[in-house]
Amino acid sequence: MGKKNAHLLRIIAVTFKISFMTKKMNLMSGDFSQKVNDLKNAKKKLKNQFIGIDDIIDSLIDNVRSWYTMNIIQEKPAVINLWGLTGVGKTSLVKKLMELLKFDDKTYRIDLGEKHGETSFTGKMKELCKVRDNNPKVIMLDEFQHARTITGPFREENIFEENRKIWELIDEGVVNYNSMNRGFAHFEQQMGRLERLIGFGVKVKNGFVVEGKDLHVSEMGGFSGKDEPLFFFPLNDYQLIIDLAGQELNIELQRDLARKLMKMNEIETMSFLKKVHSIAKRPKVKCFKRSIIFVLGNLDEAFTMSGNYSPDMSADEFHRITKKITVTEIKKALRERFRDEQIGRLGNIHIIYPALSINSYRKIIRKNLNEIGKRLKQLTGLNLKYNESVIDAIYQEGVYPALGTRPIFSTINQMIKSKLSVYVDYILNKKLKADTLFLCMEDEKLKCQIISKKELMDEVKEKVVFELRKLKEPKKDEKQAISAVHEAGHAVACQVLFNTVPDVVASVTASPENDGFVYVRPVNEYVSKKDVIPHVAMLLAGITAEELVFGEDHITSGSSSDISSATIFVTSLLKKHGFGKTKIAIADSVTESSKFYHKSEDVEEHVREIMNEAKALAKNTLIKEKPFLIELASYLSVQPRIEKDQLLKMSKKHSISNRRRGEGGTFYRDKLKNEARIILNKKNFNNQITHLVDIAQ
């Protein structure tokens, strides 16, 4: 009977356990499914709001999913890194996602570029550590590149207490925050004063001073009359005690603290304050293990084009270059700023933002104009319409590929928003019953057609300042003539020596750093020895063209960067890459590693030889192709730039090869295959001879 009962009890226990687990799973299933749906809806809304970064949004949602649905099983905070140029929307994307997931009130952005203030690490962590609950938080470490711990070629370490806390937070999900409470020093001062007052005979009953009131007032202040009760511990410092030790003493309100102190004399009060002091002095640890940390930043070492603020650069080219940046390049760039073990703590989730493309910029402009139209409709009842000329104008004035979307919004504000109030005022003053405003650009003016029931009633024109357009317009002066010849020299050499048509050649730019440029998309990701002299010749072709067209005595000072680039290029190949006569690594300076060879006289002579040979090649090339050079330079002296297609047509007239050198080429693979074929055929032949000898024997 006992065995049967025991067996029955086991069955009941197992059944109860299964039932309990089933109920728990059912509850979890409902919550889990809701969270998965939240993420799906958030993804859809984010893609509607943020243009051109669908892949980024997909990756972000995928990596947030495990934290959002199951952070309760986390032993360390989830870490997601987002890297990209400024203004591409890293911070705003994370903020919007957390808003959609209803985590915006639990999101804390820390600006690591700020050393003081509310958004600094110390300021924001102080705020975070005051939060009593242990629910998951969202911590955004913005401008993370400024938290560098390594500086200089010798990787010297920057030792800051703040840096140590940042890495503790990322790695362990904990923060030691006792030193963050600035009120601790004030509390110690108050304790010292009260202790001295007791020594001079001040007596306390039920929290109030009963003897030595005048002495207490002279030392502590805060007393208005002899008949009023005088608190021994100042009332205005009650909150300080709660901040320092309220959680440990289970005191949340000043009222609760007052009730406690009003039962004490001076000795008991000092004993209580010493207890508070002891608690406050004790290191406190705040746990963020269930939280998620977003590391946001721009790494110049990976995004090498980030310092190029020129509006002349194509947004599509920026987009193409940044799309090629890989996680390994990000980690290599991080190594310039952080220790290896710190890079490991950042984990492997690195979401890399590409620069925005031309199409994305235009969509963003259109979306912003449509939002302005909605607000105008709500405010005035007027519809807002526009044509492509408005999009073109905003793009031309507002897009700096390295700066992202911020310049666009200010351009829209200046070019469109500021004019709308003028048009609305005109309608009101004229008492026009309009229903639609139609905007278009005409002769550097924003024209507004005022329409009622599809009929034109009136129109107003407002002048628009096109600063960038003016900078890009042809000047047709001496400076443009020099730039035209110089850049034409580079372009002709590029086509002849590398069979590559430049993407764009410009003789006028909006950038103060250069008067013109030739942009050629790199064909190969390597440099071969046979290309060294042609490459240097291309760099020196600008000054060579000036000599050929204007004469030796009339060359100008605009070739410093070309000459510098050519010299650095050749010197590096000879010293570091084995292109010299002796295969040896040579130090750039006496401070560089002693493992390198330091005598470089032979290399410097070799550099001179290559530079002279390249200069001669540039001269011979341009003399041979002088008709093409002069036609291209003449065109660029009156036009600000020439694009690839037009340049291609011009070069065909001069029988210049138009094939992109290296494009689709397989020289190295073919060479390897041929060598392998020769060796294998030779081996097969030897095997056949050996076989015949064996038969003969």
Image (tube, rainbow, N blue to C red):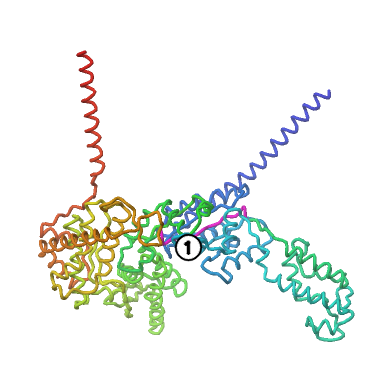
- Choose top left, top right, bottom left or bottom right for residue 106: bottom right
In the rendered view, tell whether residue 16 sits above or below residue 331. above
Residue occupying the point 44% across, 56% down: 47
Q: Amino acid at mark 1?
A: Thr
Number of numbered discs overlaid on the protein picture:
1
| Residue 409 position in % (x across, y down) | 41, 70
In the rendered image, which quarter contains the N terminus?
Answer: top right
Q: Does the stretch in magenta take in 590?
A: no
| Residue 236 position in % (x across, y down) | 75, 76
Residue 646 visible (yes or no) = no
- Choose top left, top right, bottom left or bottom right for residue 308: bottom left
In the rendered view, tell whether residue 555 sits above or below residue 6. below
Residue occupying the point 65% across, 56% down: 287
| Residue 695 position in % (x across, y down) | 21, 14
Residue under label 1, please give it. Answer: 151
How crowded is the residue under tag 1: few (<14 C-alpha within 10 Å), some, or many (20+)? few
Q: Secondary structure at mark 1?
A: strand
The answer to whether residue 248 is left or right of residue 75 is right
Residue 661 visible (yes or no) = yes
In the rendered image, which quarter contains the C terminus?
Answer: top left
Q: Nearer the viewer, residue 188 or 628?
A: 188
- Choose top left, top right, bottom left or bottom right for residue 414: bottom left
Q: Residue furthest bottom?
A: 225
Find the magenta span and give its range: 288-301
Q: Does the stretch in magenta take in 293?
A: yes
The answer to whether residue 160 is left or right of residue 286 is left
| Residue 159 position in % (x across, y down) | 56, 63
Q: Nearer the viewer, residue 572 or 91?
A: 572
